[in-house]
Amino acid sequence: MQYPYMAVSTSICETFLNPKRDIESAGSFHVLPRLQPWGYSYAHFEIPRSDCFIRPKIAFYRVNMLIESFHSGAPGQRRYCSLHRPATRLTRGIGVVLCPPLGHEYYRAYRAYVKLAQALSQAGFAVLRFDYLGTGDSDGEETHARLDDWVQDALHAAHDLESSEDTSAIVFAGLRFGGTVASLAAERHPHAAAVLLWDDIVDGRRYLQELESLHRGMLADQERFPRRRGASESAPGELLGTRYARRFLEELGNLSLPKAIARPGILRLRMRSGPASSDDAVEMQGGLDHGWHDGHRMEESLVDPDAIRTLVSRLNAALA
Amino acid sequence: MNEELHRFGAGGHLAGIVTLPGGRQHNVADTPGVVFITAGLMHKPGPYRLYVRLARTLAASGFPCLRFDLSGIGESGTGGDAEDAESVALRDVGDAMNKLSAENIATRFVLIGLCSGAEVAHRVALRDARVCGVVALDGFILRNAKYYLWHYLPRALSVSKWLDFIGRRLSPRRSGSEPEDEEQTALEFWRGPAPPRAQLEKEFTQLAARGVQQFYIFSGGSGDCSYAGQFRDVFRRVRFNDTLTVHFNRDADHMYILDADRRQLTGAISRWMQQRFSTAPSTRRTGAADVYRTGTTSPVRLAGRRLHE
């Protein structure tokens, strides 16, 4: 389908005002007017810098899809991955691995993750989203038995990203438990430049207690079920729609992350949603209250464009 | 069981996963392919991986399956044309069936959908003769007098229900974030009222006359079905001619959040599929060579369309 030409959007202003962006050797650069709300389709046009205001050269490119999905890993142990290549020639040479949250929060956040990945790719980052083994569209019926295995999935995803794209550094990012995995993975990855954390979990015991409380509330919720369901009707290790290995739950319950990243040189950007708090370990505050502890909002899709804009712009500025 | 990633639809904007029976042949002409239709803003694994489990279970029984993201959801892009949500969903399912046909995987199809996905399955079945079966999870149903009796009487007699009711009134629920504009449009479509009874009766009759097998499964948690015989009572004037099966999972919620409920549901659908559709290689000769397909073992890397320079 041929997409019609559209007027240039604010992307031009960003390009002119951000002199640190790479400029094509031919003296031309790309700007990206958005044609679709989610940025799935673009028309690109080139403007030679030398005669930008006199004789702009315009070319149309047809772009149908900028997301490439693939399986990675040995047969039966394949992770489902989705790659968002930089949606601009003004690439950063930096890859971002988006680590998903656990269980019901994975479903709540999926759409937001796609939007976050799109926004990051528009800012010149290469982004890889993935599903842990035993979750989403990845292989396996059982989730990981050890916390370290979840982190290994993130490290494998980083390897996939570095194999696909020309990256000199990796950012690990995640919401809730995804942020926890991101922190742990960044500590172990040799090229980790930053972690981008959104309502990440640092106190595993408290998080596990919250999940167990939500689960009990869910079983007793007579807006959900015609009758209260007993605890015996849950499978062993089952919490809010997902079964976990007992060993993993024990490790999660014992998890306590330090407020600072131990390895020097890794930049940490942490955002807390909702009203301001006195948490001095937070670099960003804002966005909506997503009701993580509210059982009535367990299946509510997370929609927070302001938070996504904040995350992307802060990361962009921090790594400039 | 083998899973392959595919792109299809105009411009390759739809992303899906085909689950093929592993290490065995299936008769392409006789064995229907199964297409899963998501609900609302859900992406292709389905609620709590229900569609993943169903696809892998059905593929193990010999049925090739396709689960995919509807336009604008998950890894699927938009088709580019400005259409209403219903038209887009109907087109997407058509594209999914076309993909399985083009890949020589199936020529007939069973559509499985939850909630709005069930409604889409019904509407596609009406207009596409390739659909030979519909599995509707909390699909169309109307409320009759007996519904209200079975719905409200147990609540009136239950102390725990009264306590829960009072508790909800005393602690008002905080509202969540508001969907963005286009999501709101899609959600408003899916929240719309069911078609009138006369229209549904006519449509069910049409499907039954064509021999489309229909499996309607209702959960007690959906709020629209309160007793096992409600669907048959409401549509008693329709001659289903043995094409209809109805199950009522009284204790399950609408999303099948409990693993035990999902297992029970998966088992019921798997048994129904095996009873209604054959997966054995056919010995009939149709004038052309029967076509068999064996699942492949190598994963396919999706080829997203790239910038053309």
Image (cartoon, rainbow, N blue to C red):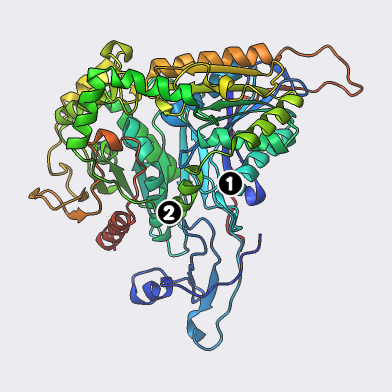
Q: Nearer the viewer, residue B73 or A220?
A: A220
Is residue A292 positioned above or below A228 on the image? below
Residue B270 screen position, x and y as percent: 57, 15
Q: Residue at x 35, y 39 (%)?
A: A108
Marks 2 and 1, how far apart in space? 25 Å
Report whether B285 appears left or right of A126.
right
Other residues around mark 1 within 10 Å, as few (<14) / some (14–19) / many (≥20): some
Kind of residue at disc 2: Gln
Numbered badge on residue A118: 2
Q: Which residue is mark 1?
A: B86
Q: Nearer the viewer, residue B38 or A220?
A: A220
Q: Is residue A159 visible?
A: no
Is residue A164 positioned above or below A124 on the image? above
Other residues around mark 2 within 10 Å, as few (<14) / some (14–19) / many (≥20): many
Q: Chain of mark 2?
A: A
Q: Are marks 2 and 1 in contact (CB under 8 Å)?
A: no
Which element type, helix, strand or loop, lies under badge 2?
Answer: helix
Kind of residue at disc 1: Glu
Q: Is residue A103 visible?
A: yes
Q: Nearer the viewer, residue B148 or B207?
A: B148
Say which quadrant the N terminus of chain A sits in: bottom right
Residue A286 screen position, x and y as percent: 21, 55
Among the 4 quarters of the image, the one containing residue A248: top left
Among the 4 quarters of the image, the one containing residue B103: top right
Task: Name the outermost residue toward the bottom.
Answer: A54
